[in-house]
Amino acid sequence: MHCQNFLNRPTNRRDMLKWCANGFGAVALSALSAEGRGKLSIDPMAPKPPHFPPKAKSVIFLYMDGAPSHVDTFDYKPVLEKYNGQDPRTAIGKLERTQFDNIGTVLKSQWDFKQHGECGHWISSLFPHLSGVADDLAMIKSMTSPFAEHTSANYFLHTGSGFQGRPSMGAWFGYGLGTENKNLPGFVVLNGGLIPPGGLDCFGSGFLPATYQGSVFLPSDNPIANVKRSESSDSLQRNKLDLIRSLDEKTLAHLQGDPQVEAAIRNYETAYLMQSAVPELTDLRGETEATKKLYGLDSTFKNTQTFAKQCLIARRLVERGVRFIELTCPGGNGDRWDQHKDLVDGHNKNCLTIDQPIAGLIKDLKARGMLDDTLIVWAGEFGRTPFAQGANGRDHNPFGFTVWMAGGGVKGGSSVGRTDDFGYKAIEDKWEIHDLHATMLHLLGIEHTKSTFRFSGRDMRLTDVHGHIIKQILA
């Protein structure tokens, strides 16, 4: 009979360094990666001190999948009315290649714009509720991206790289700060129904330990599959988990440490703790009817109800110390925000979906004294062209678009940057996603150049070798 004393898996380079030449290679390797496994094996999600006093404790990232049209939402361009219907090559001049190169005429905004709040933000009629909190919003009207295709642009927005496999910004926040609630993940994705192009890697941990990856919740009574135990009693389940942990720890000792096994052990424990925390989190019976109405849970439009529940759960996650929460949009409003045609129908439905819930979230956080230390970020992966694609749509435009922030450490009512008269390209205070990431980290007390992880022979960070803080919007 075989002794079974073998490892039934391929040997990688790390293993070879451990087991060959008396393990001398592992000594050097462990020194190089001291910031990696050595510290994280203690408790990777334990709260960690920031580099300096933070303005915010948590982030709510409102991801507008597919890219809203900035010239129809927050970047008013009256010149489009003057040149509406004209050839953009004549009106604007040289045009960059677009995703589909189906260039129509200059297309004015299909909605009215008015100034709102004491700050005078120009906001379109698509947002009657957000217009009421204009003084809480800090507009960045000159954001850019080097990518005009959804998948690469999504990776860039989420990870700071246009290529697959890098850690998501939510993972970086967990790595830098840990979490204040051991019963819940540090990075939660509230999936309204749409996983963006690029898939779950937009929420992954990349080369960071798997503990930091996003946990995807659905805004329903059962947000996670198998969150309710299948065993007849808690003690029986606990005995099974203890056995699994014992076996995993023996394997871990035999391997002399392995990040994937360490992450699996922690994930089992987190899953066990979540079985009591998650049902309580998503049980909204304790919320007042006034609060539910504020968010739009009583809306006659189903997608408003869905996004309202996401926003309300996001507030409850912040109350429970979760570090980073991302919300994705519900489906059924056209092809996400990606209106290559039927711009009016798609944007009407998308804005009806998010307008009241987001305004309700801001008002609720403010009333509870939580907005000051909760950072809200609203962004798509790029903008849309000021000229039509075909007759009634807009193509991708990465050369200038609008992102806004609110809450923790942000100067409400401020605005930075400007696109040209047509809303085509950023021409003043030009920013890119690395700068957005640097600013977000700064507001949570992290110096973005110092939050690094040793991988592949270099110190990696969310902002790579880039990133400047957008100081004009800081309170």
Image (cartoon, rainbow, N blue to C red):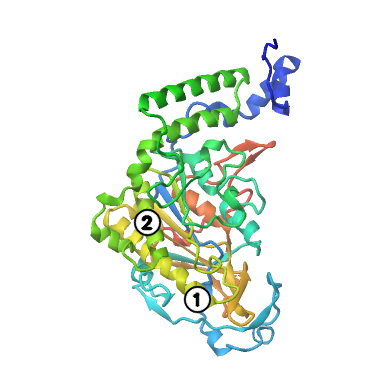
Instruction: Identify the image quadrant of residue 385.
Output: bottom right
Instruction: Give the number of marks.
Output: 2
Residue 46 in sight here: no
- Mark 1 neighbour class, 10 Å CA radius: few under 14, some 14 to 19, many 20 or more: few
- Secondary structure at badge 1 equals helix
Residue 209 in sight here: yes
Task: Give the left or right position of residue 382, taking residue 273 as reference.
Answer: right
Under mark 1, the amino acid is: Asp
Mark positioned earlier in the residue sequence (1 or 2): 2
Instruction: Report how far apart the C-alphas of labels 1 and 2 lie in the structure.
Output: 23 Å
- Mark 2 neighbour class, 10 Å CA radius: few under 14, some 14 to 19, many 20 or more: many
Q: Residue 22: horizontal and vertical position, in percent?
A: 72, 14
Residue 309 — which label?
A: 2
- Secondary structure at badge 2 equals helix
Instruction: Identify the image quadrant of residue 124.
Output: bottom left
Of the 4 image quadrants, the one containing the N terminus is top right
Under mark 2, the amino acid is: Lys
Give the residue drawn at x 39%, y 33%: 273
Q: Residue 61: horizontal and vertical position, in percent?
A: 46, 55
- Tags 1 and 2 touching, CB below 8 Å: no
Q: Residue 43: horizontal and vertical position, in percent?
A: 47, 29
Instruction: Tell me if residue 332 comes above or below residue 263 in the rendering.
Output: below
User: Which residue position holds label 1?
Assistant: 345
